[in-house]
Image (tube, helix red, strand yellow):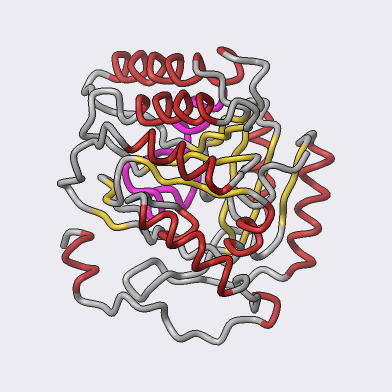
C-alpha cells in the first residue's frame, strides 16, 4: 500500500493522546499568529512553522525569526514523521516565489531567516536553485540579514552510485557558493530507524553531505538535528552524536517527536526534560559549539542566537 493511500484511511487530525505536562506550551498571542499567517497567505508562501505546526512559532515570530518552505507545499518523499503534504506531482516551480519571500522577510523585519524546502527529486538540480535564488532576493532587499539553509540531501537521479555522489556534490557546491550563514541538514533519527522514518534518505548519504559541506566551505558552520521518541535508545543517540562530530558538525538540535496525525508513525516514548539536559551535556563534551536540547526544540529553534 502506498503512503498516500495509507494516509487516506485515517483521520488527518492530531491524535488525542495525553501528553506529559512538560509538552504543554502556549503557541503565542493571537495577534502574532494572525499577523504572520496573513502575511504568508497574502504572499502565497509557505512556512514550515505553519505546515509543521511548530509549537514555538509564536515565540520565534516575536524574536524576529521564521522558516520559509520553498518549492511549494507538496513533497516528493513520504517520510513517516512529517506533516508536509506528500505526492508524486508537486507544483511547478514558481519563478516569483523568491521575490515574494524577500518581500515578506523585509515586511516582517526579520534579522535571521531559515530557508528550507520540500524534497524536489523531480527537478534536475533537486531544488538547489530554489535556495540560491531566494537567498539572492532576500539579500538584495535586506543586506544585513543572516540566512540559514535547512536542506534535503540532494541525492538521486542516477542509478550509478558514483554518478549520484558526483551529482550530489555538484549541487552542494552550487548551494555553498551562495554563502549561507549556516548549512543545516537533519539526520532526523538514529541509524537503525532510518528506513522506517526517512523514506528516500539514508544515514550515510546525510553524513556524507555534512562532511562534504565542511570540506567545501570550512567557514560555514554545519548543523543537524534529531527527533527523539521513535524507538531509539540512549546509546544509539550517543553513537549518532559521535558520528556527527566525526564529520565535524558544529551545531545540534535535539527535540521530542510529536505525532502529527494517526497517519504518521507513532510515538514510542516521551523523553523527560532531564534526559534532554543530560544529552546536551554529552553533546557539549563531544565538541558541539552550539546545542539546543529540549522536548519542544525544533530545527530552527533559537537559530539566530549565538
- From which residue to which does the magenta span run? 191-212
The number of numbered discs placed on residues in the rendered structure image is: 0
Residue 173 picture location, percent across and down: 46, 14
Task: Please say if 230 is above or below 95.
Answer: below
Task: Decide which of 178, 210 is in the foreground and name it.
Answer: 178
Q: Is residue 240 left or right of residue 134?
A: right
In which quadrant will I find the C terminus?
Answer: top right
Q: Is residue 192 magenta?
A: yes
Q: Is residue 32 magenta?
A: no
The part of the image, by quadrant, that contains residue 40 is: bottom left
The part of the image, by quadrant, that contains residue 112 is: top right
Q: Is residue 138 left or right of residue 84?
A: right
In which quadrant will I find the N terminus?
Answer: bottom left
Prevailing secondary structure of the magenta residues: helix
Q: Is residue 150 left or right of residue 46?
A: right
Residue 240 picture location, percent across and down: 62, 42
Please report the residue visible at 38 percent of the width from the left and 14 percent of the height from the top.
170
Residue 21 picture location, percent across and down: 68, 82
Task: Decide which of 89, 62 is in the foreground and name it.
Answer: 62
Task: Decide which of 106, 294 is in the foreground and name it.
Answer: 106
Please report the residue visible at 23 percent of the width from the left and 24 percent of the height from the top.
124
Please report the residue visible at 20 percent of the width from the left and 44 percent of the height from the top.
91
Please report the residue visible at 65 percent of the width from the left and 75 percent of the height from the top.
25
Q: Is residue 297 left or right of residue 130?
A: right
Task: Please say if 17 is above or below 231.
Answer: below
Residue 285 picture location, percent across and down: 84, 40
Amino acid at each position: 500500500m502506498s503512503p498516500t493511500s495509507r494516509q487516506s484511511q485515517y483521520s488527518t487530525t492530531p491524535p488525542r493522546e495525553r501528553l506529559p505536562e512538560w509538552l504543554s506550551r502556549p503557541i503565542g498571542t493571537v495577534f502574532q499568529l494572525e499577523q504572520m499567517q496573513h502575511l504568508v497567505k497574502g504572499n502565497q508562501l509557505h512556512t514550515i512553522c505553519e505546515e509543521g505546526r511548530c509549537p514555538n512559532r509564536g515565540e520565534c515570530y516575536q524574536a524576529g525569526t521564521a522558516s520559509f518552505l520553498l518549492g511549494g507545499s507538496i513533497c516528493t518523499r513520504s517520510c513517516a514523521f512529517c506533516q508536509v503534504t506528500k505526492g508524486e506531482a508537486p507544483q511547478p516551480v514558481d519563478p516569483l516565489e523568491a521575490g515574494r519571500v524577500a518581500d515578506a522577510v523585509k515586511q516582517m523585519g526579520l534579522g535571521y531567516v531559515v530557508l528550507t524546502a520540500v524534497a524536489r527529486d523531480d527537478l534536475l538540480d533537486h531544488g538547489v536553485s530554489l535556495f540560491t535564488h531566494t537567498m539572492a532576493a532576500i539579500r538584495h532587499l535586506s543586506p544585513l540579514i543572516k540566512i540559514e539553509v535547512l536542506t534535503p540531501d540532494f541525492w538521486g537521479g542516477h542509478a550509478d552510485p558514483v554518478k549520484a555522489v558526483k551529482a550530489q556534490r555538484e549541487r552542494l557546491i552550487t548551494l555553498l557558493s551562495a554563502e549561507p550563514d549556516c548549512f543545516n541538514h537533519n539526520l532526523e533519527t538514529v541509524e537503525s530507524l532510518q528506513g522506517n522514518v526517512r523514506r528516500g534518505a539514508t544515514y550515510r548519504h546525510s553524513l556524507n553531505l555534512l562532511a562534504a559541506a565542511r570540506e567545501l566551505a570550512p567557514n560555514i558552520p554545519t548543523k543537524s538535528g534529531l527527533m527523539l521518541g521513535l524507538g531509539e535508545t540512549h546509546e544509539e543517540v550517543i553513537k549518532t552524536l559521535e558520528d556527527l562530530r566525526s564529520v565535524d558538525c558544529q551545531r545540534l538540535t535535539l527535540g521530542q517527536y510529536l505525532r502529527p496525525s494517526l497517519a504518521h508513525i507513532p510515538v514510542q516514548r516521551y523523553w523527560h526534560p532531564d534526559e534532554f539536559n543530560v544529552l546536551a551535556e554529552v553533546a557539549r563534551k563531544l565538541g558541539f559549539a552550539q546545542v539546543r536540547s529540549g522536548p519542544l526544540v525544533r530545527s530552527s529553534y533559537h537559530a539566530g542566537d549565538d
